[in-house]
Image: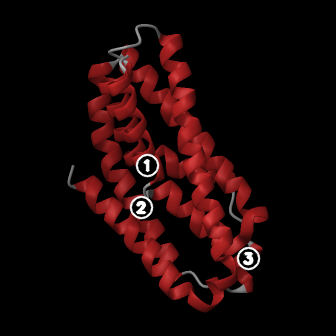
């Protein structure tokens, strides 16, 4: 792999990992409302879900390249519906005590990543354009996948810590913050449906 390819690969990974997407938005919204202590299980679910999707894509593209396209087509619709549901949930949520009683859980973060079509397309593009042409065995691809997962997880953590920083002003500006986050999710869903 040349330095120019490595440079564009790095830029592609950073841009796709750190821009607003369903996982990053959910991480930020969760820590904004619940803080780090109650939100860390959901963040762990997001990171584990990311790793699971990374491995699914790596194995699928390595072994079953022709079967991946129909799966992505189906996940596109499921993911867009789930993102719209999350957007509505965020839009309607309020900073009330009763919402804080039910802490976010691992499964919700994990499920989001399993239907997060953005990362399927991101990882599939990453693998087919940047990794598979330069790495001929599965071990190298899995190792690269672990690095990609680390970058994606770091991005979700950055968004989560941004949510912690916003937490003190959340109660005063929750409508504005929730509206912006919901709009990002609707935008993500719209973009996925139009791919």
Cα separation between marks 1 and 2 = 8 Å
Q: In the rendered structure, are the residues bearing label 3 and label 1 in contact, judged by CB atoms less than 8 Å apart?
A: no
Percent coordinates x, y for residue 53 in the rendering: 49, 36
- Number of numbered markers: 3
Locate residue 122 relative to residue 111 in the image: left or right: left
Q: State the scheme by which the image is colored.
A: secondary structure
Which numbered dot is residue 83? 2
Camera-side residue of 94 and 150: 150
Residue neighbourhood size for the residue with mark 2, other residues' Cα within 10 Å, grouped as few (<14), some (14–19), many (≥20): many
Position above or below: 171 against 104: below
Give the alpha-carbon distance from disc 2 to disc 3, as whole Å: 22 Å
Which of 40 and 92 lies nearest the eye of the viewer? Answer: 40
- In percent of the image, x 62 and y 83: which residue is there? 170
Q: Identify the residue under disc 3.
A: 100
Asked if residue 171 lies left or right of residue 62, the reply is right
Reading the chain from its start, which is encountered first: label 2 or label 3? 2
The outermost residue toward the front is 3
Q: Name the residue furthest bottom.
A: 172
Numbered badge on residue 116 = 1
Tag 1 and tag 2, C-beta contact below 8 Å: yes
Query: Residue at the spot x=40%, y=48% of the render?
Result: 15
Is residue 14 positioned above or below 145 on the image?
below
Question: What residue do we see at 42% from left, 61% from top?
Answer: 83
**Looking at the image, is mark 1 or mark 2 earlier in the sequence?**
2
- Gap between marks 3 and 1 measured at Cα: 25 Å
Left or right: residue 191 versus residue 38 is left
Q: Residues within 10 Å of mark 1 (few under 14, many from 20)?
A: many
């Amino acid at each position: 792999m040349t330095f120019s390819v490595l440079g564009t690969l790095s830029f592609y990974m950073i841009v796709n990992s750190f821009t607003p997407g369903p996982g990053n938005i959910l991480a930020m919204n969760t820590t904004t409302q619940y803080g780090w202590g109650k939100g860390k299980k959901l963040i762990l679910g997001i990171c584990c879900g990311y790793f699971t999707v990374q491995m699914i894509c790596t194995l699928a593209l390595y072994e079953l390249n022709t079967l991946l396209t129909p799966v992505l087509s189906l996940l596109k619709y499921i993911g867009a519906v789930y993102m719209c549901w999350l957007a509505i949930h965020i839009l309607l949520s309020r900073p009330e005590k009763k919402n804080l009683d039910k802490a976010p859980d691992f499964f919700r973060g994990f499920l989001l990543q399993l239907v997060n079509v953005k990362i399927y397309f991101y990882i599939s593009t990453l693998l087919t354009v940047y990794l598979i042409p330069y790495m001929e065995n599965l071990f190298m691809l899995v190792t690269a996948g672990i690095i990609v997962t680390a970058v994606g997880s770091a991005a979700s953590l950055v968004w989560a810590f941004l949510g912690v920083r916003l937490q003190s002003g959340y109660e005063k500006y929750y409508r504005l913050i929730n509206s912006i986050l919901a709009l990002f999710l609707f935008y993500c869903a719209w973009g996925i449906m139009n791919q």
